[in-house]
C-alpha cells in the first residue's frame, strides 16, 4: 500500500520526481502507460503501476513503448511513455513521424537525461529532439514542477494535437522534495479511433500536406511559449548578470547567485525568444546556464542577443554550485580562488557483480580461455570488463553485441585470424534489440558464439520483469518466451543451442571452449536467476578451513565479493622463483551458499560449517 | 527552527541502508517544519559501488546538492567511505563513522591498499570524529540489520532538532509496517546514541 496513491488533493508529500510524474499521470486521466526500464527513469512506470486506473506495461523496448502510447492516443485515451535518454534514440523512429500526423488523446513522452552519467553509456541532451521532431518541451526543475508540468503537458498535447516531451534529468527524477497535490483523478471521455486515412496513413501523399501544418503548429507553440507562465522571471537587485536557465540548473543558479535576476524556462521549446530579448535588455550581461548542450545559447545568439554560456561553462556534466561559482565569478570581476580543502586518497570502489551472481560463472570461463574477442552489451554483465575477469572488450548500446560481433567476424584483421568472436548479452537486452542481431547473423552465415545470460530479470535497473521472466510489470503470470526455441526459430541449429547451469564451472568452461571452436553460430544459454530477485534461493553459507587453504587464489579469480583475501605470503618455489600466495576467507553474511567457489578449490578447503551461526565479517588486512 | 541550511551527507556502500537512513533524516526534518531536499547518486550502487545521499533542510532549499566543504554532518557507514567523502565536510563539521572495513575486489586482488587507519586520518584533518563498531553492537542485539538504526541513534545528538524527533520518525515506520521489530530498534537507537557520545 502506497500512501501517495490514495492521498487527497491539498496533501503534501516528500516525493521523488519520478513519483510525482506517476501521480500527475493518474490525476491527468492517463489510461495507458508504457516504458522500458532505464536509469534514472525506471521508477516512473513502477509507481504508475500502483494506480489501478491506469493500464501499464513494461514494453520490450522504448520504440514499442512509444508506439503503444501512440495507438492508445489514436483511440482517444491519454497515454504516457517513459524512458531514459538513450531510449529516445530507439523510440525516435516512431515519434518523428507521429509528429506529422499528430495525436488525439494527450500523448506525453517523459524522458530522463542522465546528466553526469551516473548509470549510462553516454550523456545526451534530449532537448534536441524537440527541435528535430518539432515537439514542445517542458522542463521541470524539481518534483513539484514535474507534477504540475506533466498535467500541463497533457492539456497542451490535446490542444495542439502534438506529442509533448517532458524532459527530466537525474537530479529531478531521483531528488526527493515537497509536493503539494492540487487535484485527484479526472476521468476523460474516450472517443475511440476515428478512421481518417489522410490523417493517420503517412504515405508521401498524405504526409506532404502535413508538413506546412506542422510548421504552423510550431509558430502557434512559439506564441504559447512566449505567453506561458512556465517561463517565469525572478527579479533580483544585482543587474550585473542575468541568467537564462532551465531544469535543475535553475536551482543551482538561485542557490549560487540569490540576488541575480533569472528567467527560468519551464516551456523551453520552442524558446520564447521575445521574452528572452526583453529580459536581456534589463541586465548588463546575459548568461545561459543549461545542461548540457548550448541549445538555448545558440538560438538566443541567432536572435541577435549578446550572450555568454559555454564559453565559460562546461558542455557536459551537472552545473552544480561548485561548477557555477568559479565559472561565473570572474565575469563579475570577482576572481574566485578554489578553497583549500582536505584531500584524501582512497582506492576506487567500482560497481561489481554480487555474491553468487549467475554471471560470475560465465566470466570465470571467459577469463580462463585465450584468443577471444568478447563483444559485450548493456547490463550487469558489462561489469565483466572489470577486475578480476577483464573479459569484456566492447560495450556500445542495447543489443549491439551480436551485430558488432558479426561485423568483427566479417571484418577480421591479421591479428584476429586465430581469434574466436564471442557476444555476451542478457535476457532482457536480447529481447529489447538483440534478437534482430542474431537473425541477421544467421541469415548472413556469420560465426559468433553467443552467451545469452538469462538471469530472468532486468538486473541493472533493479530486477524488473520482461517477456523472459514469466511475469509482467504487476508481478502477475505472463507467457514466458523460450529462448532455446526462439534461437532455433531464428535459425540456430538445435545442436548448437546449449543450456547450462552457470554455477557448474567445469561444464561452463568446457561448453564455451567447445562452442567457440565450431564453424557455425552457437548460443549458450545460462539458467540461474539474478541473486537480488525473489526467484533466487539462498543456501547455508560456506567458509574456508584456514589450515586447508593452500593460498592458490583460484577462488579469488571468481570475483565473488563474498570472498576476500585474509592474508598474503611470499614463498620461494623449488625452482627458486618467488611466488605470492593468497589465502582466502568467506564473508558468511554475504555468502548465499551457491557453491561456485567450491569448484575452484582443489584442496577442498571450502565447506559448509556444521554450526551455521558463526559470523565471519570482511575485515581486510591492513 | 534554524534560519540557515543544514547539510547532512550519508555515505557507504550499496546495500548498507544509506538511502533508508537518509530518508529517515529527511522525513524528520520535514516533520520539524523545514523545507527539505534529498538526493543521491546510486545508479549502479546496488553492485557494491559507492552510495552518497545528500540531505539539505532549512527555511527554503534550492539546490539539492551539498558543495564540497559545506556538510555539517558526515555519516559514514564504512570507514574508507567516510575518508573518501571527508572533503565535503566543513572544518567545523562532525563525522560519525562506523569502523566497518569492506574491501572491494580491486583491493582483494592487490591493485590498491585499504587505508591502514582511516579513522586516524579523519581525525588528523582536525574535524570532530566519533567512531565505533556498529556491527558489534548489532550483533550484541542479535540482528545485523540494526546497524542503520544504530547509526541514526549515534548522530541524533548532533541534529538541530531533538533526538526524540528522529527516534519517533523511525519508530512510526516500524510500528506501522514491522511492529515486531519496533522494540529492538528502540534499543538499537538508544545503544547507538550512547556509542555516538564517545
Image (cartoon, grey):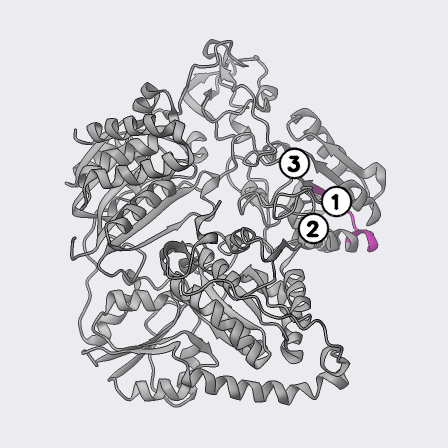
Residue A605 painted magenta? no
Magenta stretch, residue numbers: A441-451
Q: Which residue is mark 1?
A: A481
Residue at position x 65%, y 86% in the image? A211
Q: Earlier in the sequence, mark 1 or mark 3?
A: 3
Chain where mark 3 sits: A
Query: Which quadrant of the figure has residue A404?
Result: bottom right
- Location of residue A194 in the rendering, given as x and y in whole percent from the top left corner: 73, 76
Residue in the foreground of this view, choosing between B26 and B101: B26
Instruction: Determine whether, in the image, residue A494 is placed left or right of residue B115.
Output: right
Compared with A382, B57 (above or below) is: below
Compared with A166, B50 (above or below) is: above
Chain where mark 2 sits: A
Select label 2 or label 3 by which is in front: 2
Between the C-alphas of marks 2 and 3, the distance is: 29 Å
Residue at position x 81%, y 51% in the image? A442
Specify the label residue A431 is tagged with: 2
Q: Which residue is mark 3?
A: A370
Residue at position x 45%, y 16% in the image? A572
The C terminus of chain A sits in image quarter: top left
Select label 1 or label 3 by which is in front: 1
Amino acid at each position: 500500500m502506497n500512501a501517495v496513491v490514495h492521498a487527497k488533493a491539498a496533501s503534501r508529500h516528500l516525493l521523488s520526481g519520478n513519483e510525482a510524474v506517476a501521480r500527475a499521470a493518474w490525476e491527468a486521466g492517463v489510461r495507458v502507460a508504457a516504458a522500458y526500464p532505464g536509469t534514472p527513469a525506471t521508477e516512473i512506470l513502477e509507481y504508475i503501476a500502483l494506480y489501478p486506473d491506469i493500464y501499464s506495461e513494461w514494453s520490450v523496448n522504448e520504440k514499442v513503448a512509444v508506439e503503444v502510447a501512440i495507438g492508445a492516443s489514436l483511440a482517444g485515451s491519454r497515454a504516457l511513455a517513459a524512458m531514459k535518454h538513450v531510449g529516445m534514440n530507439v523510440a525516435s523512429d516512431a515519434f518523428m513521424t507521429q509528429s506529422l500526423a499528430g495525436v488525439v488523446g494527450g500523448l506525453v513522452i517523459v524522458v530522463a537525461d542522465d546528466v553526469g552519467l551516473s548509470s549510462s553509456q553516454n550523456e545526451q541532451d534530449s532537448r534536441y529532439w524537440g527541435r528535430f521532431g518539432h515537439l514542445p518541451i517542458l522542463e521541470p526543475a524539481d518534483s513539484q514542477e514535474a507534477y504540475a508540468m506533466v498535467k500541463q503537458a497533457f492539456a497542451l498535447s490535446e490542444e495542439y494535437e502534438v506529442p509533448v516531451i517532458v524532459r527530466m534529468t537525474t537530479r529531478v527524477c531521483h531528488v526527493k522534495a515537497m509536493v503539494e497535490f492540487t487535484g485527484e483523478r479526472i476521468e476523460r471521455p474516450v472517443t475511440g479511433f476515428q478512421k481518417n486515412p489522410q490523417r493517420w496513413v503517412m504515405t508521401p501523399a498524405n504526409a506532404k500536406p502535413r508538413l506546412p501544418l506542422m510548421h504552423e503548429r510550431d509558430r502557434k507553440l512559439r506564441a504559447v511559449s512566449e505567453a506561458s507562465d512556465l517561463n517565469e522571471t525572478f527579479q533580483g537587485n544585482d543587474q550585473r548578470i542575468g541568467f537564462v536557465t532551465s531544469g535543475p540548473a535553475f536551482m543551482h543558479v538561485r542557490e549560487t547567485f540569490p540576488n541575480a535576476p533569472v528567467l527560468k524556462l519551464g516551456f523551453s521549446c520552442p524558446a520564447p525568444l521575445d521574452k528572452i530579448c526583453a529580459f536581456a535588455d534589463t541586465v548588463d550581461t546575459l548568461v545561459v546556464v543549461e545542461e548540457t548542450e548550448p541549445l538555448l545559447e545558440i538560438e538566443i545568439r541567432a536572435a541577435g542577443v549578446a550572450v555568454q554560456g559555454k564559453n565559460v561553462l562546461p558542455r557536459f556534466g551537472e552545473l552544480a554550485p561548485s561548477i557555477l561559482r568559479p565559472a561565473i565569478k570572474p565575469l563579475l570581476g570577482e576572481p574566485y580562488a578554489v578553497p583549500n580543502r582536505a584531500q584524501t586518497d582512497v582506492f576506487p570502489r567500482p560497481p561489481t557483480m554480487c555474491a553468487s551472481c549467475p554471471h560470475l560463472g560465465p566470466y570465470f570461463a571467459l577469463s580462463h580461455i585465450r584468443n577471444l574477442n568478447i563483444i559485450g552489451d548493456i547490463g550487469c554483465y558489462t561489469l565483466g570488463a572489470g577486475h578480476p575477469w577483464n573479459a569484456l572488450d566492447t560495450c556500445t548500446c542495447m543489443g549491439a553485441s551480436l551485430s558488432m560481433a558479426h561485423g568483427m567476424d566479417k571484418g577480421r584483421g591479421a591479428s584476429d585470424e586465430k581469434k574466436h568472436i564471442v557476444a555476451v548479452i542478457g535476457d532482457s537486452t536480447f529481447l529489447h534489440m538483440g534478437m534482430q542481431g542474431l537473425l541477421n547473423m544467421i541469415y548472413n552465415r556469420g560465426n559468433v558464439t553467443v552467451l545469452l545470460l538469462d538471469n530472468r530479470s532486468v538486473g541493472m535497473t533493479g530486477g524488473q520483469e520482461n517477456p523472459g521472466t514469466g511475469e509482467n510489470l504487476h508481478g502477475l503470470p505472463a507467457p514466458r518466451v523460450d529462448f532455446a526455441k526462439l534461437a532455433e526459430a531464428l535459425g540456430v541449429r538445435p545442436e548448437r543451442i546449449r543450456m547450462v547451469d552457470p554455477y557448474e564451472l567445469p561444464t561452463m568452461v568446457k561448453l564455451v571452449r567447445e562452442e567457440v571452436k565450431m564453424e557455425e553460430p552457437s548460443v549458450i544459454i545460462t539458467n540461474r536467476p539474478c541473486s537480488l530477485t525473489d526467484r533466487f534461493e539462498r543456501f547455508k553459507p560456506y567458509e574456508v578451513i584456514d589450515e586447508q587453504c593452500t593460498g592458490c587464489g583460484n577462488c579469488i579469480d571468481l570475483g565473488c565479493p563474498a570472498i576476500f583475501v585474509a592474508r598474503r605470503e611470499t614463498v620461494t618455489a623449488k625452482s627458486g622463483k618467488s611466488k605470492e600466495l593468497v589465502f582466502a576467507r568467506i564473508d558468511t553474511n554475504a555468502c548465499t551458499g551457491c557453491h561456485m567457489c567450491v569448484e575452484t578449490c582443489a584442496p577442498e578447503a571450502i565447506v559448509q560449517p556444521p554450526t551455521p551461526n558463526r559470523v565471519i565479517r570482511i575485515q581486510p588486512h591492513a | 527552527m534554524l534560519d540557515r541550511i543544514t547539510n547532512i551527507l550519508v555515505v557507504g556502500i550499496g546495500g548498507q541502508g544509506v538511502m533508508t537512513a537518509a530518508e529517515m533524516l529527511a522525513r524528520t526534518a520535514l516533520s520539524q517544519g523545514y523545507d527539505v531536499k534529498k538526493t543521491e547518486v546510486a545508479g549502479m550502487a546496488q553492485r557494491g559501488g559507492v552510495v552518497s545521499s545528500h540531505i539539505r533542510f532549512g527555511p527554503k532549499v534550492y539546490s539539492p546538492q551539498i558543495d564540497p566543504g559545506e556538510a555539517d554532518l558526515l555519516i559514514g557507514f564504512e570507514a574508507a567511505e567516510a575518508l573518501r567523502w571527508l572533503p565535503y565536510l566543513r572544518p567545523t563539521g562532525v563525522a560519525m563513522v562506523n569502523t566497518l572495513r569492506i574491501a572491494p575486489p580491486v583491493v582483494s586482488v592487490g591493485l590498491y591498499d585499504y587505508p591502514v587507519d582511516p579513522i586516524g586520518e579523519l581525525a588528523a584533518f582536525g574535524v570532530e570524529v566519533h567512531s565505533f563498531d556498529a556491527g558489534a553492537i548489532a550483533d550484541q542485539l542479535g540482528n545485523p540489520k540494526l546497524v542503520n538504526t544504530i547509526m541514526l541513534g549515534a548522530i541524533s545528538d548532533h541534529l538541530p532538532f531533538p533526538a526524540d524527533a528522529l527516534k519517533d520518525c523511525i519508530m512510526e515506520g516500524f510500528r506501522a509496517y514491522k511492529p515486531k521489530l519496533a522494540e529492538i530498534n528502540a534499543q538499537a537507537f538508544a545503544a547507538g546514541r550512547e556509542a555516538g557520545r564517545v
